Amino acid sequence: MPIIVVPLAASACQSNNHDPCRGVRAGAATGGVRLWVVWTGPAARVRIAAAGARVNDEFGAKLGFVLKFLTLSNGYVAAELAVDKSLVERWVAGTVHPSAHNLGRLTEFLARRVPGVTLLDWDRSVEALRDRFGGSGLPPQVTPTAVADWLAHPKVAEVAAATAIDGMKVTGFWRTTRAAPDMPGRFCHDYGMIAPRSDGPLYCEIGVFSSRLSGWGMIAGDQNYSCSSSHALGSMTFGIFNRVRAARIDAIDGISLACSPARLLACSAVGGGIPIALATCMERVGELSGDAVADKHRLATLLADHPLAREGTVPDTLRHHLLRDIGPAAHGDGGDLFLMMILMTSLARGASVDQPAVRLHAVS
C-alpha cells in the first residue's frame, strides 16, 4: 500500500466534498504539528495531513516580530548563526522553515537576550508570543506610532533610497578617534562596521570589547546621519558627520551624542550616564569581504583591541581638531560659541577607488 505525505490543513477534511477523508484512524501532536493518519476510501491510501500547518505558516510572522522587537537585522542574525542572510530572509518571509538544528541554534541565540525562551515558545500564537516577549504591560506594536510615522515620512524614504546608491562609498570597517571623557588629554577608539542593507539605510555596528550598539545610517546632502542602540539596555548614540563627494570616502568627522558612563571601558553601551557631545573623527581601516560571517569575525577581532589610544599616536592636528575651546570666552577671542564641525575646516577625506586610502594618522 503506497504512503503519500501531503500537507493538509485540518479544515480540509471538513470542506473537501470530493475527498471526505473517511475513516480517520489516529492523531498525534508532534513538534507543534498535529499528524493525522487518514484512510481515504477504496484505494486505501494513507495520508499524513499536517492539521497544525498553521504553526509553520505563521513562523515567519513570529520570527519577524521577535527580530523587530529586539532590533535585530536579518544580516546580524545570519552572521551570529553562521548561515546565509538569504536563508534568514526566507525564514522571515515564511517560504522556508528552519531545520531542527537551526531552530535550536536560533532559539539559543534569542534566549541570550530574553532569558527563559525555549523551543516551546514557537508553538505559541503570534499574539501569545507578543505577550511572551513584550510583557503584559506593553502594547503589541513593535514600533510606537510616533516613531513609525516619522520613519515613514516621505522625505526620509527619499533619503533612504538615495543612501542605497551613495552609501556604498562609506561601507567598510571604521575606527573612531574621540576624547576620553574621564581622562583629560587622552583619546580612545571605537571600532565599527558600516554595511549595505537591501531596504536602503546602512547597517551600522560599533562598540568596545563585547559592548556593542547597532542601528542605521543615512546620507543627506553633505552629512552622514546615524542612530545606534544597545540590544541589551536600549541606550542610544547619535551621530552627524561631514563627508566629501568622492568615489570612496576614507575619513569623516562630526559630532557624536551619547550618555557617557563613569568609566571609559564601559563605552556607551551601558545604561545611565551623563549626556555628552564629542567631536569625533572616523577613519576607514578595512573593506568588507562580502561574506557576512567573515565580516562579523573581522569586527570581533577589531573590537578586541584596547580602546585607549597609546600616548603619542594621535597627531597634533587631530588633537586640536577634536579638543577645542568653545563658549563665551573662546567666542570673544574669535573662536566658536558652540561645538561645531564646520565643513570648510573638516578633515573628511576621500579618493578614487584605485588610489591608496587617505589616513589622518597611522593605523596600527
Image (spheres, helix red, strand yellow):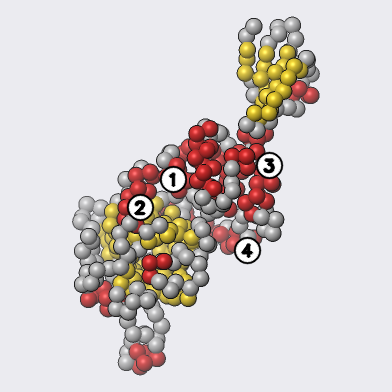
Q: For the residue carrying disc 4, how many other residues have a C-alpha within 10 Å: few (<14), some (14-19), or many (20+)?
A: few
Between the residue at mark 4 and the residue at mark 2, the CA separation in whole angstroms equals 35 Å
Look at 47% across and 65% down and name the residue there. Answer: 270
Q: Which residue is mark 2?
A: 300
Camera-nearest residue between 205 and 283: 205
Look at 40% across and 64% down and name the residue there. Answer: 224
Give above or below for 344 relative to 55: below
Between the residue at mark 1 and the residue at mark 2, the CA separation in whole angstroms equals 11 Å
The numbered mark, 3 or 4, whose residue comes first in the sequence reads 3
- Residue 80 bears which disc, if any? 1
Determine the image quadrant of residue 260: bottom left
Q: Which residue is mark 4?
A: 146
Q: Which residue is mark 3?
A: 125
Q: What type is the residue that disc 4 sits on?
A: Ala
Give above or below for 110 relative to 163: above
Judged from the image, the secondary structure of the residue bearing numbered disc 3 is: loop
* In-image side of 250 versus 241 (left or right): left
The numbered mark, 4 or 2, whose residue comes first in the sequence reads 4
Q: Is residue 201 visible?
A: yes
| Residue 181: percent from left, percent from top | 37, 75
* In-image side of 342 versus 125 (left or right): left
| Residue 13: percent from left, percent from top | 76, 22
Q: What type is the residue that disc 1 sits on?
A: Glu
Query: Which mark is in front, 4 or 2?
Result: 2
Between the residue at mark 3 and the residue at mark 4, the CA separation in whole angstroms equals 27 Å
